[in-house]
Image (cartoon, rainbow, N blue to C red):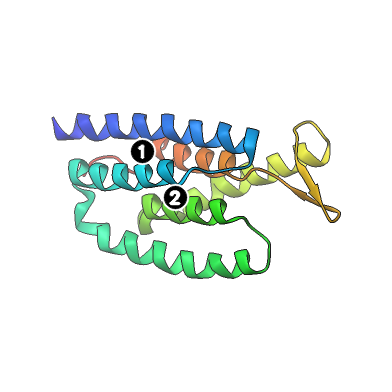
């Protein structure tokens, strides 16, 4: 029963990630409320899937990532919403799935950037630089690890 419920949490999370991605594409904003719900869904999934035993490692990895990402934010390389969403995504990924998450994220971010440079998708141009909505790539990375079974119940 709990295993089935954990898969339902992944489906709900994927739907919320899709919403966050579309909102970021349209308005270049990521809702703090959506991020808090993603964090709550993480803890619910961890409890239902049996992954609660590794939660402390997920939290530690996310905290380290947040510290490193703050540097990118301070340099103007990423927006605040992107930093928070990436931190939540790394919380979800944990030490077991972070490499796969980052690989998928890299592929989708590259494709989105290329599409923006070719003007196939909209992007902001600021001081000669292209700025894309990053949430779609993060959402693709997380949904990718869900689909790969990386967060299956243990």
Q: Which mark is residue 89?
A: 2
Circle 2 residues within 10 Å: few <14, some 14–19, many ≥20? many
Residue 79 — which label?
none
Residue 116 falls in image quadrant: top right
Q: Earlier in the sequence, mark 1 or mark 2?
A: 2
Kind of element beneath mark 2 = helix
Mark 1: give few (<14), some (14-19) or many (20+) Cα within 10 Å.
few
Query: Could you tell me residue 126's position as x and y percent?
Result: 80, 52
As displayed, is residue 44 above or below residue 70? Answer: above
Viewport quadrant of the N terminus: top left
Q: Position of residue 55 (x, y in %)?
A: 26, 57
Residue 5 horizontal/vertical position (percent):
21, 31
Residue at (40, 51) in percent of width and height: 93
**Nearest to viewer (mark 1 / mark 2):** 2
Residue 149, disc? 1
Residue furthest left as drawn:
1
**Which quadrant would the C terminus be assigned to in this image?**
top left
Which element is circle 1 on? loop
- Alpha-carbon span between mark 1 and mark 2: 16 Å
In this figure, what is the number of numbered marks? Answer: 2
Q: 81 or 87, which lies in front? A: 81
In this view, 71 is above or below 118: below
**Residue 26, quarter of picture:** top right
Residue at coordinates 15% horizontally, 34% vertically from top-left? 2
């Amino acid at each position: 029963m709990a295993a089935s419920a954990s898969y339902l949490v992944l489906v709900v999370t994927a739907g919320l990630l899709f919403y966050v991605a579309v909102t970021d594409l349209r308005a270049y904003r990521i809702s703090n409320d959506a991020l808090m719900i993603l964090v709550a869904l993480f803890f619910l999934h961890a409890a239902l899937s049996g992954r609660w035993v590794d939660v402390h490692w997920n939290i530690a990895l996310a905290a380290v990532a947040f510290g490193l990402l703050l540097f990118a934010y301070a340099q103007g390389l990423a927006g605040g919403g992107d930093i928070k969403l990436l931190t939540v995504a790394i919380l979800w990924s944990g030490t077991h799935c972070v490499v796969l998450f980052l690989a998928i994220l890299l592929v989708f971010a590259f494709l989105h950037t290329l599409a923006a440079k070719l003007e196939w998708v909209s992007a902001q141009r600021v001081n000669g630089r292209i700025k894309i909505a990053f949430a779609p790539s993060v959402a693709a990375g997380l949904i990718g690890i869900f689909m790969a079974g990386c967060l299956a119940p243990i």
